[in-house]
Image: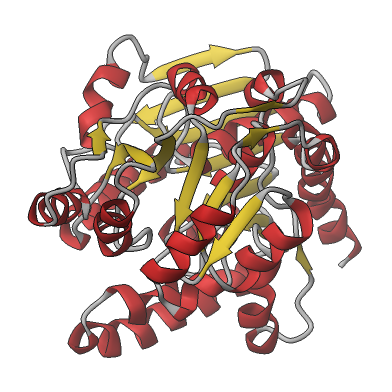
Amino acid sequence: MRILFLSFYYPPDLSAGSFRASSLVKALLERLPETAHIEVITTSPNRYLSFSQAAKDGVPAYEQHPGLTIHRVALPEHQSGMRDQSRAFYAYAREALRISRGHSYDMVYATSSRLMTASLGAWLSRRLKAPLYLDIRDIFVDTLKDVLPSRVSWLAKPIFGRIEKWTLRQAKGVNLVSEGFLEYFEPRYPGRRFSLYTNGIDEEFLRAAPITTSCREQKPLSVVYAGNMGEGQGLHEIVPELAKRLEGRAHFILIGDGGRRPHLEAALAKAHCTNVEVRDPVPRDQLIKLYQQADVLFLHLNDYPAFRKVLPSKLFEYGALGKPILAGVSGYAARFIEKHLDNAQVFPPCDVDRGESAFTALSPETAPRETFTRSFARHNIMLEMAQDVLAVKTREKVS
């Protein structure tokens, strides 16, 4: 069997999609016979401009391993704007078409958050006459109305809605990374079978999980956030005022980059916050150490209806490390936290008053979450998903 595997992000890039893709590749290689081969087409590290150049050093554009080939497409320099991202994706798609030309594959797999990698997978699936499996990590069409100006979204949404329908109709298998996505997809695609293999906890975080319980009463408490700083996270809407309220009680360390980082830094300066540090992204081994040094781990999603369906991958990292969690989320993510994570306080997005109350209610205790780590070990989830991916070929033969 030969599998064409499309993922815009892949290690050493810093992205939830990157780590998810590499974990699935490993699981597929465990399931496949030695004669099988996976061909990954991805990009050179580009998730964050402040991290990408350093990450590119020493990363080959082409790798060959037993049962695995990795092609990394070099992209034009880009940031978070739609125009830049479109140029970057065009470069990736053009090279994916070139690399796959003249080859035969038994199936195509694509993991996608912004729909376009999924659509590229659908196009290649038709061209190569190979069944398609899609892994949907976000609902791009549903998000457009929240993150784009209304004068743009009213035109873009029906166009991308048609692209989404065409893309999903090509797929023999579709996985949704969040159970909350079902309320969007099931009414639009009646009769379609959706699998629900969520994100999980990688081995590095399982190894870093606490064994015993400890408590720190010393003030101020260190509150750490790491990840994207975009419109979706809305850090610029919550952190400046919340940090100001918590002066003397909390010191915020925000690690990452993204399109709204300049807005965040400007808002912090305007609020005269003295208890917030904004740092550039760091490799994963350094990030785990920073998590372990933290007293509280922080998460926030902006107050948009589309984000009530998502389940942030960061929750699995945070949960494994046993730290108190302060989460400004709603909808499915809030329900997931309340069900699976103890010593976690949830407050409505962008609500500073409730955020302050939630912080006050936290216990400054680090404790193992053994049931959580057992239930959501990424390796086990990916082994099950790999079996579902490979079953697409069987389902095609039956149909």
Q: Which residue is drawn at 74% across and 26% down?
A: 213
Residue 200 in the figure: left or right of residue 35: left
Q: Which of 58 and 202 is in front in this view?
A: 202
Residue 70 location (% of width, % of height): 49, 24
Here the colouring is secondary structure
Q: Is residue 26 above or below residue 360?
A: above
Residue 122 in the figure: left or right of residue 369: left
Location of residue 39 by image quarter:
top right
Q: Residue at x 71, y 23 (%)?
A: 210
Tally of marks: 0
Q: Where's the N terminus, which quadrant?
A: top right
Question: Which residue extends farthest top?
Answer: 58
Q: Is residue 277 visible?
A: yes
Residue 21 location (% of width, % of height): 58, 37
Q: Which of 206 and 249 is in front in this view?
A: 249
Residue 244 location (% of width, % of height): 25, 54
Q: Nearer the viewer, residue 176 or 391?
A: 176
Q: Which residue is drawn at 20% across and 53% down?
A: 264
Q: Can residue 174 be seen in this view?
A: no
Q: Is residue 42 above or below residue 69?
A: below
Residue 50 location (% of width, % of height): 21, 31
Q: Which residue is drawn at 30% across and 62% down?
A: 231
Q: Where's the C terminus, which quadrant?
A: bottom right
Residue 301 in the figure: left or right of residue 271: right
Q: Nearer the viewer, residue 349 or 296?
A: 296
Question: Which residue extends farthest right?
Answer: 398
Q: In this view, does 389 lie above or below 279?
A: below
Location of residue 37 by image quarter:
top right
